[in-house]
Image (cartoon, helix red, strand yellow):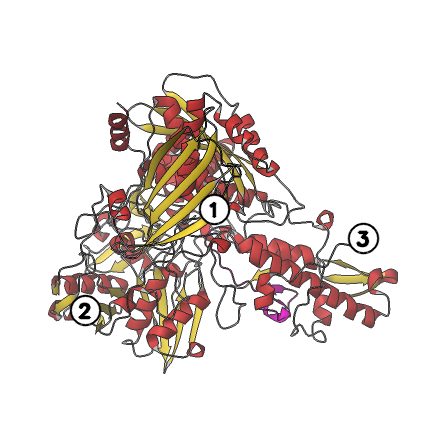
Amino acid sequence: MPITRFRLNGVETDVDADPDSLLLDALRGRLGVIGAHFGCGSGECGACRVIVGDHAVTACDAPLWSVANKDVTTVEGLGNAERPHPLQRAFIAEQALQCGYCVSGILISAAALLRQNPRPSEADVRTALDRNLCRCGSHNRMVRAILRAANEMAAR
Amino acid sequence: MSTPAAPKLPVSLVANPMLSSWVKFGPDGEVTVSPGKVEIGQGIVTALAQIAADELDVDLARVQMIRASTAASPNEGVTSGSLSIQQSGRAIRHACAEIRQIFLGAAADRLGVEASALDINDGTISGPGNIRTSYWELAGEVSLDRDATPGAVPKPIAQRALAGNSVQRLDIPDKVFAERRFIHDTALPGMLHGRVLRPEISRAKLVDLREDGARAVPGLVAIARDGSFCGVVCETEAAAEAACVALRKGATWSAGETLPDENDLAAFLKGQPVESTVIDCKAASPAGENTRTIRRQYTRPYIAHASIAPSCAMAQWSGDRVHVWTHSQGVYLLRADLALVLKLPVEHIIVEHLEGAGCYGHNAADDVALDAVLLAKAAGGRPVRVQWSRADEMTHAPFGAAMAIEIEADLDAQNEIVCWRHSIWSNGHSARPGRASQPALLAAFELEHPFPRVISANPPQANGGGGDRNSIPLYDFPAWKIESHRLLTMPVRTSALRTLGGQGNVFAIESFLDEIAAERGEDPVAFRLRHLADERAKDVIRSSAKRANWKPAAKAGTGHGIGFGRYKNTGAYCAVVAEIEGEEDIRVKRLTIAVDVGEAINPDGVVNQIEGGAIQATSWVLKERVRFDSERITSNSWAEYPILRFSEVPQVDVEVIQRSEIDPVGAGEAAHGPVAAAIANAVFDCLGVRVRNLPITRDSLIAAMELAS
């Protein structure tokens, strides 16, 4: 099997799998990185979003070959309890979720937005998240949390 | 001054009296609290921890909440109906109050002082002269293997340090840091992956199966088939997906069962055999003078739970015993149904809860657990994880039942209501597992020797009712008759969805009231207040109206409407003012809400539940409708079953009326009915047209306009 090499959360990673197989299967399967969640399998809900380069993409319909030699960031790559990303801190501060299954994909969309537009308006945030679905109705809290993180990052 | 009567034992303690089944003191200075209710994203675990920490006088950080399992947890039935705070919360409060007293007594004996001279601070029990001990020092000699007694009196409100405060939820950090908390992310040693093949044609039977394609998939461990139930077990999830695709290609299905006309649900619902029940009757004496009668019909479609995660479960056999991991809302109830299907004593089955995504009622969580149990039989003792596809989640899980509601009002010469008649046609709103002599799990209907398909029933009105939930008016009409017609056929599978019939009934009642108020030329807020005696009801209406500056001056292209309900007529009070913009499409701009849940244990948790409920309700009203043709459910993806998106979500402004002296009730289902009505009433205010058939889409607006012209 050909090896696909990419940087996963900053670490050089080799995956020995069919290049046409799905990025999400590689992440959740052999790499054991579970932050990106399966939701629909057809790129419609955003629960599996990861950042490739500077853009958020759905990993459930992205072939492995499409990330060859690229930087892939999952929610684990944003931060952890010891070193949280400002977005993660803000989501806790705003209590910005209910069940939380969609939240890793939403954090990823938000992180990609803030890389491209560090001072987004509320409308910018809603537009950036429009392809992420949340079923619990935590949308407004999430928007508040993202604006809070943007402010915090801009103030640094 | 008389002392208040000792409280009665809460229902969950009556069912599970052993104190040690609720609370234990661990060796490392922790307190483990074991509720029978489960976290479904509603924050219940945190609210229950607050209650326990308060009553025991320990830091919240010491409290460890145990996930429900039939191996050890109290049996609290199902986590549903906005009852968790009411049932589990009261039980934990009383159990902890009694445990505190027991330890104070033991500390008094050890320290040689009166218990009344002792104080507890973060679990350390101290008294005059620096004498001290702790829960943990005493734990070895104090047995909690004893039954709770009704005499324990919880702390007065003023001494509660945590209840009533918005503490941060305990589960949120794990979820933003992607710790393995969801069942979907849990890996057991040696775990295999399963997928089940289900027909696209409704209730088609598997008549032939060629297995060669699936057998060629590398990593295939087994193909399991029992009648029309069929699935694969593989070494990896990707292999299981591939094998299931191959299996579908080799499957031949029978014809299915015909589905009703999705464009005339009322005719279908009213044309079926039904069981009719008079829910309530009130006679006026003397009967009011009836000058004219007006009648309106309202409908809501089938609505999908549409959890953001497909349902998932794991199972592992060891001889004739099986261990099941599930995100079911009721571990004991699921176990009871598994025992029926497997013909095993319940003691041979352990059902353990792991968190899933929000379910909003009875979705496929229980079904997939049986799938995993059946597939794991072919796994040679290894655990098998089964996850449904998005399409199966959208088509095979139970739906919230469609409803047709007809209301008639007799009006006197002054257009005052003298009599009110409300009739509901709907399938039953509950076919939850574990409550009957037959299992309610999908695979049980598909086996070679199948169990009969369960026809959904309605919980009794004493438990809040089902299709009839919230159908008895909260208003002081002089006479009424409320009737429920439950269908005895069920071509589309239905079961509990958030609010059961409450959303439909409140939508109908509050829409019709608005219509009568408009006809009278009376302000709809004033009209409601005039017909209500309950001050808590009036307070939420007045608060939401005031907060929304009711009624803002009319502006072209905008409209305002109000809706009110008290969930189940016994739960949380909620009033909503909706502000919308509309021409061809409706946009909900803002929902201004007042809610009264009695004592709000975690006020931000209440706000979160109300906001979420309001946004989900807006999605139901503006977008949601299960689609089908005569042979299959066609809304099998997010593209075919759209829900509200970030750019479409209204601002939601929530005021919690805190009533610390009143026992708390749940908040998760309070907003749905009032939001639906408020939006529909705002549409009328904006466009002058009454939409009586949900959802309110461009098509239903056009249909309503045509009807009105």
Q: Residue under circle 1?
A: B281
Report whether B93 appears left or right of B666.
Answer: right
Snapshot quadrant of residue A106:
top left
Mark 2 to mark 3 CA distance (whole Å): 77 Å
- Foreground residue among B418 and B254: B418
Residue B32, quarter of picture? bottom right
Which residue is identified by label 3? B2
The amino acid type found where label 1 is placed reads: Cys
Q: Quadrant of residue B4?
A: bottom right
Query: Which one is earlier in the sequence, the residue at label 3 or at label 1?
Result: 3
Identify the magenta region. Answer: B16-41
Q: Amino acid at mark 2?
A: Pro
Q: Nearer the viewer, mark 2 or mark 3?
A: 3
Q: Earlier in the sequence, mark 2 or mark 1?
A: 2
Q: Is residue A150 visible?
A: no
Question: Could you tell me the amino acid type at mark 3?
Answer: Ser
Residue B218 badge:
2
* Quadrant that contains the C terminus of chain B: top left
